[in-house]
Protein backbone atom coordinates (compact mmCIF):
# COMPACT_ATOMS: atom_id res chain seq x y z
CA UNK A 1 0.00 0.00 0.00
CA UNK A 2 1.23 3.48 -0.76
CA UNK A 3 -0.25 6.92 -0.58
CA UNK A 4 -0.12 9.21 -3.61
CA UNK A 5 3.64 9.68 -3.83
CA UNK A 6 6.26 9.17 -6.54
CA UNK A 7 3.58 8.86 -9.21
CA UNK A 8 4.48 9.06 -12.87
CA UNK A 9 3.99 12.48 -14.46
CA UNK A 10 3.10 12.27 -18.14
CA UNK A 11 0.30 12.66 -20.65
CA UNK A 12 1.33 10.33 -23.50
CA UNK A 13 -1.88 10.57 -25.52
CA UNK A 14 0.16 11.48 -28.58
CA UNK A 15 1.05 7.81 -29.09
CA UNK A 16 -1.68 6.01 -27.12
CA UNK A 17 -4.12 4.31 -29.50
CA UNK A 18 -7.15 6.41 -30.39
CA UNK A 19 -10.47 4.58 -30.38
CA UNK A 20 -12.77 7.59 -30.66
CA UNK A 21 -14.53 6.22 -33.72
CA UNK A 22 -15.88 3.09 -32.02
CA UNK A 23 -17.51 5.19 -29.29
CA UNK A 24 -19.49 7.22 -31.84
CA UNK A 25 -21.49 4.26 -33.13
CA UNK A 26 -25.13 3.75 -32.23
CA UNK A 27 -24.37 0.37 -30.63
CA UNK A 28 -21.36 -1.50 -29.19
CA UNK A 29 -20.66 -4.00 -31.98
CA UNK A 30 -17.56 -2.15 -33.21
CA UNK A 31 -16.46 -1.60 -29.61
CA UNK A 32 -16.35 -5.34 -28.94
CA UNK A 33 -14.90 -6.17 -32.34
CA UNK A 34 -11.96 -3.77 -31.94
CA UNK A 35 -11.28 -3.83 -28.20
CA UNK A 36 -12.30 -7.44 -27.87
CA UNK A 37 -9.68 -8.27 -30.47
CA UNK A 38 -7.10 -6.61 -28.22
CA UNK A 39 -8.11 -8.63 -25.17
CA UNK A 40 -9.70 -5.66 -23.42
CA UNK A 41 -10.54 -6.95 -19.93
CA UNK A 42 -10.23 -4.13 -17.40
CA UNK A 43 -13.99 -3.79 -16.67
CA UNK A 44 -14.17 -7.47 -15.80
CA UNK A 45 -10.99 -7.32 -13.73
CA UNK A 46 -12.34 -4.28 -11.89
CA UNK A 47 -15.74 -5.82 -11.27
CA UNK A 48 -15.03 -7.89 -8.12
CA UNK A 49 -13.26 -4.89 -6.58
CA UNK A 50 -16.15 -2.59 -7.42
CA UNK A 51 -18.58 -5.10 -5.91
CA UNK A 52 -16.50 -5.36 -2.74
CA UNK A 53 -16.42 -1.58 -2.35
CA UNK A 54 -20.13 -1.34 -3.08
CA UNK A 55 -20.97 -3.93 -0.44
CA UNK A 56 -18.96 -2.04 2.16
CA UNK A 57 -20.81 1.17 1.31
CA UNK A 58 -24.18 -0.58 1.41
CA UNK A 59 -23.34 -1.84 4.88
CA UNK A 60 -22.02 1.55 5.96
CA UNK A 61 -24.99 3.50 4.63
CA UNK A 62 -27.57 0.76 5.35
CA UNK A 63 -29.26 1.33 2.04
CA UNK A 64 -28.76 0.71 -1.70
CA UNK A 65 -25.99 2.74 -3.29
CA UNK A 66 -25.33 4.43 -6.63
CA UNK A 67 -22.14 3.98 -8.64
CA UNK A 68 -21.08 6.71 -11.06
CA UNK A 69 -19.03 5.27 -13.92
CA UNK A 70 -16.79 8.02 -15.35
CA UNK A 71 -16.14 7.26 -19.00
CA UNK A 72 -18.83 4.59 -18.96
CA UNK A 73 -19.02 4.13 -22.76
CA UNK A 74 -21.72 1.54 -23.53
CA UNK A 75 -22.22 0.49 -19.90
CA UNK A 76 -19.85 -2.48 -19.96
CA UNK A 77 -18.78 -2.13 -16.31
CA UNK A 78 -22.43 -2.12 -15.26
CA UNK A 79 -23.09 -5.23 -17.34
CA UNK A 80 -20.29 -7.27 -15.80
CA UNK A 81 -20.78 -5.90 -12.27
CA UNK A 82 -24.53 -5.87 -11.79
CA UNK A 83 -25.69 -8.48 -14.30
CA UNK A 84 -22.65 -10.75 -14.02
CA UNK A 85 -22.21 -11.21 -17.78
CA UNK A 86 -18.60 -11.63 -18.94
CA UNK A 87 -16.81 -9.64 -21.62
CA UNK A 88 -16.20 -12.85 -23.54
CA UNK A 89 -19.94 -13.58 -23.55
CA UNK A 90 -20.63 -10.09 -24.86
CA UNK A 91 -17.92 -10.31 -27.49
CA UNK A 92 -19.26 -13.65 -28.71
CA UNK A 93 -22.80 -12.29 -28.73
CA UNK A 94 -21.95 -9.30 -30.90
CA UNK A 95 -19.95 -11.43 -33.34
CA UNK A 96 -22.95 -13.63 -34.20
CA UNK A 97 -24.15 -13.13 -37.76
CA UNK A 98 -27.75 -12.95 -36.55
CA UNK A 99 -26.79 -10.03 -34.31
CA UNK A 100 -24.46 -8.33 -36.78
CA UNK A 101 -27.24 -8.22 -39.37
CA UNK A 102 -29.60 -6.25 -37.11
CA UNK A 103 -30.13 -2.53 -37.37
CA UNK A 104 -28.98 -0.50 -34.36
CA UNK A 105 -32.61 -0.02 -33.44
CA UNK A 106 -33.30 -3.74 -33.64
CA UNK A 107 -30.19 -4.56 -31.65
CA UNK A 108 -31.14 -2.13 -28.89
CA UNK A 109 -34.55 -3.78 -28.56
CA UNK A 110 -33.01 -7.24 -28.42
CA UNK A 111 -30.31 -6.13 -25.97
CA UNK A 112 -32.88 -4.61 -23.63
CA UNK A 113 -34.53 -8.04 -23.35
CA UNK A 114 -31.17 -9.79 -23.13
CA UNK A 115 -29.88 -7.75 -20.20
CA UNK A 116 -33.26 -7.84 -18.46
CA UNK A 117 -33.04 -11.65 -18.48
CA UNK A 118 -29.95 -11.64 -16.25
CA UNK A 119 -30.30 -11.51 -12.45
CA UNK A 120 -29.71 -7.90 -11.42
CA UNK A 121 -28.58 -6.57 -8.04
CA UNK A 122 -31.31 -4.28 -6.78
CA UNK A 123 -29.05 -2.71 -4.17
CA UNK A 124 -26.63 -1.23 -6.73
CA UNK A 125 -27.64 1.47 -9.19
CA UNK A 126 -25.38 2.58 -12.04
CA UNK A 127 -25.28 6.06 -13.51
CA UNK A 128 -22.80 7.14 -16.15
CA UNK A 129 -20.93 10.08 -17.59
CA UNK A 130 -19.27 9.97 -21.00
CA UNK A 131 -18.60 12.39 -23.83
CA UNK A 132 -20.22 10.02 -26.34
CA UNK A 133 -23.94 10.74 -26.73
CA UNK A 134 -24.35 7.54 -28.72
CA UNK A 135 -22.82 5.32 -26.04
CA UNK A 136 -24.80 6.95 -23.23
CA UNK A 137 -28.05 6.67 -25.19
CA UNK A 138 -27.47 2.97 -25.83
CA UNK A 139 -26.52 2.15 -22.22
CA UNK A 140 -29.62 3.89 -20.90
CA UNK A 141 -31.96 2.42 -23.49
CA UNK A 142 -30.95 -1.20 -22.85
CA UNK A 143 -31.11 -0.75 -19.06
CA UNK A 144 -27.43 -0.95 -18.15
CA UNK A 145 -27.48 2.60 -16.79
CA UNK A 146 -30.28 3.95 -14.64
CA UNK A 147 -29.28 7.44 -15.75
CA UNK A 148 -26.56 8.92 -17.89
CA UNK A 149 -25.32 12.23 -19.20
CA UNK A 150 -23.17 12.98 -22.24
CA UNK A 151 -20.76 15.79 -21.43
CA UNK A 152 -17.05 16.49 -21.84
CA UNK A 153 -16.04 18.09 -18.55
CA UNK A 154 -12.53 18.65 -19.86
CA UNK A 155 -14.02 21.33 -22.12
CA UNK A 156 -17.64 21.95 -21.15
CA UNK A 157 -19.18 23.56 -18.07
CA UNK A 158 -20.96 21.47 -15.47
CA UNK A 159 -24.59 21.71 -16.55
CA UNK A 160 -27.61 21.07 -14.35
CA UNK A 161 -28.25 17.63 -15.82
CA UNK A 162 -24.68 16.53 -15.10
CA UNK A 163 -24.90 17.94 -11.57
CA UNK A 164 -28.08 15.95 -10.94
CA UNK A 165 -26.59 12.66 -12.13
CA UNK A 166 -23.26 13.15 -10.32
CA UNK A 167 -24.94 14.18 -7.07
CA UNK A 168 -26.47 10.72 -6.66
CA UNK A 169 -23.08 8.95 -6.49
CA UNK A 170 -21.93 7.05 -3.41
CA UNK A 171 -18.99 5.54 -5.31
CA UNK A 172 -17.23 6.96 -8.37
CA UNK A 173 -15.36 4.49 -10.56
CA UNK A 174 -13.07 4.92 -13.55
CA UNK A 175 -11.61 1.87 -15.29
CA UNK A 176 -9.90 3.47 -18.26
CA UNK A 177 -10.74 7.14 -18.55
CA UNK A 178 -7.74 8.65 -16.74
CA UNK A 179 -5.53 10.22 -19.38
CA UNK A 180 -8.55 11.17 -21.44
CA UNK A 181 -9.93 12.96 -18.40
CA UNK A 182 -7.80 14.87 -15.93
CA UNK A 183 -7.97 16.79 -12.67
CA UNK A 184 -10.08 19.33 -14.58
CA UNK A 185 -12.95 16.84 -14.83
CA UNK A 186 -12.55 15.66 -11.25
CA UNK A 187 -12.56 19.24 -9.98
CA UNK A 188 -15.95 19.82 -11.60
CA UNK A 189 -17.27 16.50 -10.33
CA UNK A 190 -16.14 17.19 -6.77
CA UNK A 191 -17.67 20.68 -6.81
CA UNK A 192 -21.08 18.98 -6.77
CA UNK A 193 -20.34 17.67 -3.27
CA UNK A 194 -19.24 20.93 -1.66
CA UNK A 195 -20.72 21.17 1.82
CA UNK A 196 -21.40 17.45 2.15
CA UNK A 197 -19.51 14.18 2.27
CA UNK A 198 -17.94 13.27 -1.05
CA UNK A 199 -18.31 9.73 -2.42
CA UNK A 200 -15.52 7.19 -2.45
CA UNK A 201 -13.46 7.30 -5.65
CA UNK A 202 -11.84 4.22 -7.21
CA UNK A 203 -9.64 4.60 -10.29
CA UNK A 204 -7.70 2.14 -12.41
CA UNK A 205 -4.92 4.21 -13.95
CA UNK A 206 -2.53 3.11 -16.69
CA UNK A 207 0.99 3.24 -15.32
CA UNK A 208 2.23 5.89 -17.76
CA UNK A 209 -0.25 8.41 -16.38
CA UNK A 210 -0.03 10.48 -13.21
CA UNK A 211 -2.74 10.46 -10.57
CA UNK A 212 -1.09 13.14 -8.42
CA UNK A 213 -3.17 16.13 -9.56
CA UNK A 214 -6.40 14.18 -9.30
CA UNK A 215 -5.52 13.00 -5.79
CA UNK A 216 -4.90 16.63 -4.83
CA UNK A 217 -8.35 17.59 -6.09
CA UNK A 218 -9.90 14.74 -4.12
CA UNK A 219 -8.04 15.78 -0.97
CA UNK A 220 -9.90 19.07 -1.06
CA UNK A 221 -13.05 17.01 -0.56
CA UNK A 222 -11.48 15.38 2.52
CA UNK A 223 -10.63 12.20 0.65
CA UNK A 224 -7.29 10.50 1.25
CA UNK A 225 -5.83 8.44 -1.58
CA UNK A 226 -4.26 4.99 -1.27
CA UNK A 227 -2.48 3.13 -4.05
CA UNK A 228 -2.54 -0.65 -4.04
CA UNK A 229 0.97 -2.01 -4.54
CA UNK A 230 0.29 -5.74 -4.37
CA UNK A 231 -0.80 -6.09 -7.99
CA UNK A 232 -1.24 -4.31 -11.25
CA UNK A 233 -4.23 -4.88 -13.49
CA UNK A 234 -4.22 -5.77 -17.17
CA UNK A 235 -6.17 -3.46 -19.45
CA UNK A 236 -5.52 -4.79 -22.97
CA UNK A 237 -2.82 -5.69 -25.46
CA UNK A 238 -0.98 -2.91 -27.24
CA UNK A 239 -2.73 -1.77 -30.39
CA UNK A 240 0.49 -1.21 -32.32
CA UNK A 241 4.25 -1.67 -32.06
CA UNK A 242 4.60 2.10 -31.82
CA UNK A 243 2.27 2.25 -28.83
CA UNK A 244 4.25 -0.54 -27.18
CA UNK A 245 7.70 0.89 -27.85
CA UNK A 246 6.88 4.42 -26.78
CA UNK A 247 5.10 3.20 -23.65
CA UNK A 248 8.15 1.15 -22.68
CA UNK A 249 10.44 4.10 -23.32
CA UNK A 250 8.28 6.38 -21.21
CA UNK A 251 8.02 3.93 -18.32
CA UNK A 252 11.77 3.35 -18.39
CA UNK A 253 12.46 7.09 -18.37
CA UNK A 254 10.19 7.45 -15.34
CA UNK A 255 11.86 4.59 -13.46
CA UNK A 256 8.94 2.18 -13.75
CA UNK A 257 9.96 -1.42 -14.43
CA UNK A 258 7.87 -2.91 -17.27
CA UNK A 259 9.31 -6.43 -16.86
CA UNK A 260 6.62 -9.09 -16.96
CA UNK A 261 3.96 -6.49 -17.62
CA UNK A 262 4.11 -3.93 -20.44
CA UNK A 263 7.24 -5.69 -21.73
CA UNK A 264 5.08 -8.76 -22.36
CA UNK A 265 2.68 -6.79 -24.55
CA UNK A 266 -0.08 -5.65 -22.20
CA UNK A 267 -0.99 -2.27 -20.80
CA UNK A 268 -1.18 -2.41 -16.99
CA UNK A 269 -3.01 -0.16 -14.54
CA UNK A 270 -2.59 0.72 -10.88
CA UNK A 271 -5.54 0.86 -8.49
CA UNK A 272 -6.19 3.99 -6.43
CA UNK A 273 -8.90 4.37 -3.81
CA UNK A 274 -9.83 7.69 -2.18
CA UNK A 275 -11.90 7.75 1.02
CA UNK A 276 -12.25 9.73 4.26
CA UNK A 277 -9.28 9.05 6.54
CA UNK A 278 -11.59 7.54 9.18
CA UNK A 279 -12.66 4.85 6.69
CA UNK A 280 -9.02 4.09 5.86
CA UNK A 281 -8.17 3.73 9.54
CA UNK A 282 -11.09 1.34 9.91
CA UNK A 283 -9.92 -0.83 7.02
CA UNK A 284 -7.07 -0.27 4.58
CA UNK A 285 -7.14 -0.95 0.87
CA UNK A 286 -4.72 -3.81 1.50
CA UNK A 287 -7.27 -5.42 3.81
CA UNK A 288 -10.06 -4.98 1.29
CA UNK A 289 -7.98 -6.59 -1.44
CA UNK A 290 -7.05 -9.45 0.89
CA UNK A 291 -10.75 -10.11 1.49
CA UNK A 292 -11.31 -10.28 -2.27
CA UNK A 293 -8.41 -12.71 -2.69
CA UNK A 294 -9.61 -14.89 0.19
CA UNK A 295 -13.13 -14.88 -1.18
CA UNK A 296 -11.87 -16.11 -4.55
CA UNK A 297 -10.02 -18.97 -2.89
CA UNK A 298 -12.96 -19.96 -0.69
CA UNK A 299 -15.35 -19.99 -3.63
CA UNK A 300 -12.90 -21.69 -5.99
CA UNK A 301 -12.84 -18.80 -8.46
CA UNK A 302 -9.29 -18.87 -9.85
CA UNK A 303 -10.34 -16.85 -12.89
CA UNK A 304 -10.74 -13.72 -10.80
CA UNK A 305 -7.54 -14.02 -8.83
CA UNK A 306 -5.58 -14.92 -11.95
CA UNK A 307 -6.52 -11.54 -13.38
CA UNK A 308 -4.31 -9.91 -10.74
CA UNK A 309 -0.74 -9.62 -11.93
CA UNK A 310 1.55 -9.72 -8.92
CA UNK A 311 4.06 -6.89 -8.73
Image (cartoon, rainbow, N blue to C red):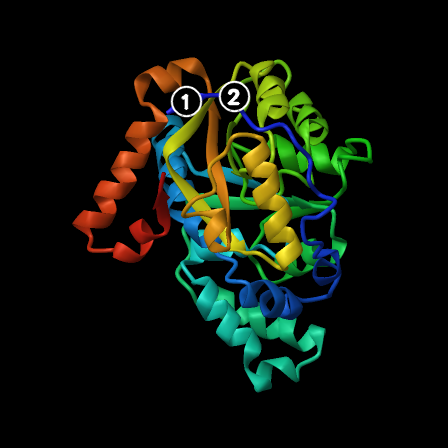
Q: Where residue 234 sits: x, y (%)?
A: 46, 49
Taking depth in this image into account, of 43 and 130 the one nearest to the observer is 43
Taking depth in this image into account, of 90 and 112 the one nearest to the observer is 90
> In the image, is residue 204 above or below residue 15?
above
84 relative position to 195: left or right: left
Q: Secondary structure at mark 1?
A: strand
> In the image, is residue 176 above or below residue 61?
below
Disc 1 packing (10 Å; few <14; some 14–19; many ≥20): some
Image-quadrant location for residue 54: top left
Q: Quadrant of the C terminus?
A: top left
Q: Nearer the viewer, mark 2 or mark 1?
A: 2
- What residue is rendered at 75% in x and 61% in y? 21
Tell which residue pokes out farthest to the left in this image: 298
- What residue is rendered at 31% in x and 22% in y? 283
- Labels in figure, total: 2
- What residue is rendered at 31% in x and 57% in y? 303
> In the image, is residue 187 above or below residue 141?
above
- What residue is rendered at 48% in x and 56% in y? 41
State whether residue 43 appears in this view. Answer: no
Question: Circle 1 is placed at which residue position?
Answer: 2
User: Does the CB distance between marks 2 and 1 fall below 8 Å?
Assistant: yes
Q: Where residue 168 sits: x, y (%)?
A: 58, 34
Q: Secondary structure at mark 2?
A: loop
Question: Circle 2 is placed at which residue position?
Answer: 6
Q: Where residue 95 sits: x, y (%)?
A: 56, 78
> In the image, is residue 72 above or below residue 254?
below
State whether residue 204 appears in this view. Answer: yes
Amino acid sequence: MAHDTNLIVSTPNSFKANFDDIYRRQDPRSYFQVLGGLGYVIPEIASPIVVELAERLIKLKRQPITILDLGCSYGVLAAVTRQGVTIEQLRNRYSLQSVRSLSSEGLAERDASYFASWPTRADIRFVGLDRSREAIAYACRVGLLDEGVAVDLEKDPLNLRAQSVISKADLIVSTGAIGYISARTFSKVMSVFEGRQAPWVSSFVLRMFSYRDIARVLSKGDLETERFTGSTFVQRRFESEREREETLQLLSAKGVDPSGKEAKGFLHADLFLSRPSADIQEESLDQIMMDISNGDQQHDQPARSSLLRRA
